[in-house]
Amino acid sequence: MEYTLIMVTASSREEAEKIATTLLERKLIACANILGPVSSRFWWQGKIDSAEEYMIFMKTKRELFDQVADNVKQLHSYEVPEIIALPIVEGAKPYLEWINSSLAGE
């Protein structure tokens, strides 16, 4: 079983909470941590821009990434939302088992 940490930035705490709660209700993620505000700097429309955002860290199985990304795109206010995944290469066995048991189809 491969697990992943999906990172998404949101424009507000309310948007971050809506995304996290919806994905939890749909059992696409086992857990979400919302941090912020965070100060972001990025290229947008040919110039350097900045924003105050909220970062969502979500734990799930790698095979659910496409479903998570599709749901985030539907719920998100940004034209191009940040949706990236990092592999979880190691973890405490009970925690990884808990992730697995918390997701749809388990």
Image: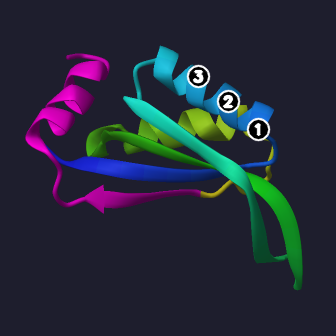
Decide: is 95 above or below 106.
below
Q: Give x and y (percent) for residue 2.
A: 18, 48
Numbered label tally: 3
Which residue sits at x=42%, y=32%?
31
Say which element carries label 3.
helix
Q: How many other residues sit within 10 Å of disc 2, few (<14), some (14-19) or many (≥20)?
A: some
Asked whether 54 falls inside the magenta stretch, the response is: no
Which residue sits at x=58%, y=30%?
20
Q: Are marks 1 and 2 in contact (CB under 8 Å)?
A: yes
Q: Give x and y (percent) for residue 3.
A: 25, 47
Q: How far is disc 1 from disc 3 in space, using C-alphas? A: 12 Å
Which residue matches tag 2? 17
Relative to 95, 9 lies left or right = right
Asked whether 91 falls inside the magenta stretch, the response is: yes
Observer-side mark, 1 or 3, equals 1
Q: How far is disc 1 from disc 2 in space, using C-alphas? A: 6 Å
